[in-house]
Amino acid sequence: MSQALEGFRILDMTHVQAGPTASQLMAWMGADVIKFEPPNGDATRGQLRDVPGADSLYFTMLNCNKRSITVNMKSPEGKQVFTELLGECDVIMENFGPGVLDRLGFTWETVHSINPRIVMASIKGFGSSGPYADFKAYENVAQAMGGAMSTTGVPDGPPFVTGAQIGDSGTGLHLVIGILAALHQRTRTGLGQYVEVAMMDSVMNLCRVKWRDHQRLTRGPLPEYSVHTEQGMPYTPRAGNDSGGGQLGNAIHCKPHGTNDYIYVVVQEAVWEALARRVGGDALATDARFATIGERRRNQNEVWHLLNEFAASYTKREFMAILNELDVPCGPIMSTEDLADDEHVRGREMYVELDHPQRGKWHNVGMPIKLSASPAVIERSPLLGEHTDEILTQVLGYDSARVEQLKAAGAFSAPPKKK
Ligand SMILES: CC(C)(COP(=O)(O)OP(=O)(O)OC[C@H]1O[C@@H](n2cnc3c(N)ncnc32)[C@H](O)[C@@H]1OP(=O)(O)O)[C@@H](O)C(=O)NCCC(=O)NCCS
């Protein structure tokens, strides 16, 4: 079966998480992704290792379905191999620190002149312009500077990072969208272009509703917030587990009241009466304090109190069953343990078992984009330099004498350490 991106070849210089998550998605959609690594490899191969001597899960979970070549870009021969690969690829992806590729001699202008059809896709912490352009960034730096942390947590506590990697993987998603758009435009123009995605910009994009609220505060308080807000408040506050939308919502603690015994309940307008009747009989269903959405917003802390009281007799799954019958939008808080064992998750191939020559059986989170005509086939990540010879011969057409000559010249290995 042919795959959606079959025929596209990607020169993937990305490392750590933000870039590799993007190129892994492209590989899962069928692109030939060549992971172009320095001789000592993507640093994450050795980070947070759980099996001695084996590539870490950090690496294996972000680099599936890729081929690995190691090239020393600080040698003239390595630069030559890189230049020739540029001529054979549709996309080059990178997420180095500011100026790294420029220092190696490969600005966008140079890359474009080598292969005018190539799309060059870069992730930077803050982009290539503006006062922050020279700064490096990691996930939580982007969450801090993109507005996520200041709006996550409770007002009288510290700002919190979210568990979801919106700074890294969220930025990777933006990059994939940019690359696909650029490839599409290339079919009309014949030319590649430079795609730049900044982590800070991506986090801002993902915090869009907080900007809605930031501007609404100039006109009045935010009635749907359970925490105090008032007209003229200069920033959007942290609001715990408030829904953040037009419908009220919160996390309700269930039996036996452990760390993850919660269910998120959205008290949608349409379901209030049925929910109220189930929780507190006719008395609650006709209680004037909750008769309208405005009243429920005003008295929402009492709504949460009543739901918490009711939920104390049920586990999150039992409460879910009750709410499902009433068509109340809800979701139990799923721990990683819950998810790893979940029938729905397994059925949708969102937690898949793979084999790896160094670590044996392991699991990866599956492909969240389901293409009906070309579903992803997930394969393990490559070992460091596993495909160096294959890529040199198959993609660049080198013969074995040329490969050996380049090896001897140090094109694929780290320079010896200075004594
Ligand atoms: C993630 C980050 C902070 C890591 O910083 P770092 O470990 O210092 O790595 P850098 O990207 O700055 O530099 C990589 C170095 O490896 C070198 N290198 C990379 N590939 C190479 C190769 N194939 N051969 C030889 N050297 C290579 C580069 O030349 C550079 O060396 P230099 O510092 O002498 O210029 C930084 O890359 C960054 O800010 N990236 C953009 C934002 C981002 O994606 N962050 C999220 C990561 S999940």
Image (cartoon, rainbow, N blue to C red):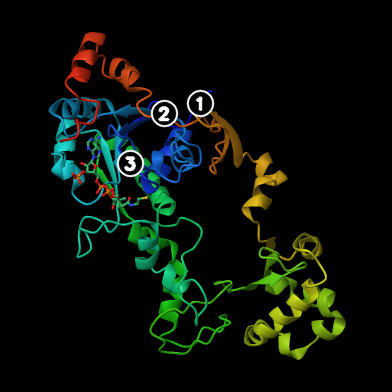
The reply to whether callout 1 and callout 3 are in contact (CB within 8 Å) is no
Task: Give how far across and how far down residue 343 sits, in percent.
Answer: 72, 44
Check disc 2 and report its element: helix, strand or loop: loop
Where does the C terminus fall, quadrant-wise? top left
Q: Is residue 339 visible to the viewer in this orientation of the structure?
A: yes
The reply to whether callout 1 and callout 2 are in contact (CB within 8 Å) is yes
Task: Give how far across and how far down residue 196 sits, in percent.
Answer: 28, 50
Q: Hey, which residue is sitting farthest front in the picture?
A: 419
Type of residue at label 1?
Answer: Pro
Compare residues 96 and 323 and report the one nearer the observer: 96
Badge 1, how many Cα within 10 Å: few under 14, some, many 20+?
few
Q: Which residue is mark 2?
A: 383
Check disc 1 and report its element: helix, strand or loop: loop
Q: Nearer the viewer, mark 3 or mark 2?
A: 2
Type of residue at label 3?
Answer: Thr
Name the image quarter holding residue 137.
bottom left
Residue at left offset 64%, top offset 56%:
335
Task: Give how far across and how far down residue 371 sits, in percent.
Answer: 55, 37
Q: Quick check: is the Cβ at mark 3 less than 8 Å away from ligand 1? A: yes
